[in-house]
Image: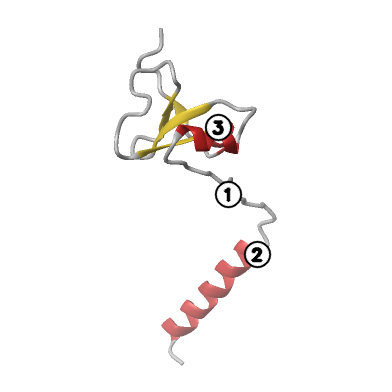
Amino acid sequence: MSWSGIRRGVGGIALAAIIAGSGAEVSATPLSPFRYEAQAQRHCPHDQVVWLDFRKGVYYTRAQKRYRQGFDGSFVCLGEARDARYRRSLLGLR
């Protein structure tokens, strides 16, 4: 085995040890996008439904002009959008 092969093997082992021994738990928050507003409201009856723009990484509330607009969006629950680190759009707020 050459010296570069040994270094690659040791680097891979070290990386695996760092990942396994980090102790920090990473969990993805489930995001349930829906095509229709009523579907999202049935999914989260006690939460507000927002329009999530995936491309911009923001969500719009019902009072905003861009709610339900765009092809890169979907209806989601407000709590899920916040947990998934999407931010509120300030456009159209008064």
Rendering quarter of residue 42 = top right
Q: Which residue is mark 3?
A: 41
Q: Position of residue 67 (x, y in %)?
A: 38, 24
Residue 62 against residue 42 in the figure, above or below? above
Q: Which residue is mark 1?
A: 28
Q: Amino acid at mark 3?
A: Gln
Q: Amino acid at mark 1?
A: Ala
Rendering quarter of residue 2 = bottom left
Secondary element under disc 2, as helix, strand or loop, is helix
Q: Marks 3 and 2: CB-CB under 8 Å?
A: no
Left/right placement of residue 18 relative to residue 31 reads right
Left/right placement of residue 72 relative to residue 12 reads left
Q: Which residue is mark 2?
A: 20
Q: Position of residue 61 (x, y in %)?
A: 45, 22
Q: Position of residue 44 (x, y in %)?
A: 60, 34
| Badge nearest the viewer, 3 or 2 | 3
